[in-house]
Image (cartoon, rainbow, N blue to C red):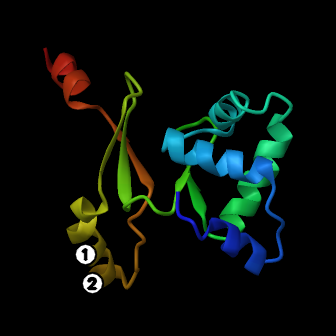
Amino acid sequence: MSQDWADRLREQGFRITPQRQLVLESVNTLEHGTPEEILIEVQKTASGVNLSTVYRTLEVLESVDLITHTHIGHGSPVYHSKEQAPHIHLVCDKCEVVTSIPAAAASEFAADLLETYGFTAHMTHMAVTGLCSICSKNSRT
């Protein structure tokens, strides 16, 4: 976890609290955690923290650009540190396995969107659904 997290919070007028530190540490530990998973991780250290505190804290941490979220499926969003390299989530519709690949894998697609439609795509922390190699192979046999 970067040491400037506290400075970034202070610069934006937020106090440094143990809950904010624990939530940020949990996001970093989990790498991709839902608010519920983050709560479970936080409660390993601070049992008095509740889900509404986690949600409020995630909102603050995202507003100061320390974390971001994406929607991988129909459930809760997943949160991850902005320090992580940009990546794309491949989500299997059948077994629900999530595989992360470098965002650069979609660079040709992004270039085509820009050239054809004038659309500048942010190919970071997005989800693509389909079938993983195992489920795809099993569906063909």
Q: Nearer the viewer, residue 58 or 77?
A: 58
Are there few (<14), some (14-19), or many (20+) residues within 10 Å of tag 2? few
Between residue 30 and residue 90, name the one nearer to us: 30
Up-down relation of residue 14 to residue 98 (above or below): below
Q: Residue at x 48, y 44 (%)?
A: 31
Q: How many numbered marks have been drawn onto this rendered protein structure?
A: 2
Residue 59 pos. (x, y %): 74, 58
Which type of secondary structure does the marked residue at label 1 adopt? helix
Read off the residue under disc 2. 115
Residues at discs 2 and 1 in contact (Cβ within 8 Å):
yes
Q: Measuring from the top left, give residue 26's x and y in whole percent.
A: 61, 42
Disc 2 from disc 1: Cα separation: 5 Å
Name which residue type carries label 2. Answer: Glu
Q: Residue at x 29, y 32 (%)?
A: 131
Residue 20: horizontal and vertical position, in percent?
A: 75, 53
Residue 78 visible within the image:
no
| Location of residue 123 (image quadrant) | bottom left
Give the image location of residue 27, x and y in percent. Answer: 58, 46
**Residue 44 relative to residue 115: left or right:** right
Name the residue located 83 percent from the left edge and 35 percent from the top edge.
49
In which quarter of the view is residue 6 placed? bottom right
Q: Residue furthest front?
A: 3
Please rate how many residues cluster around mark 1, counting C-alpha atoms within 10 Å: few if below 14, some from 14 to 19, many from 20: some
Q: Is residue 80 left or right of residue 111?
A: right
The residue that label 1 is drawn on is 112
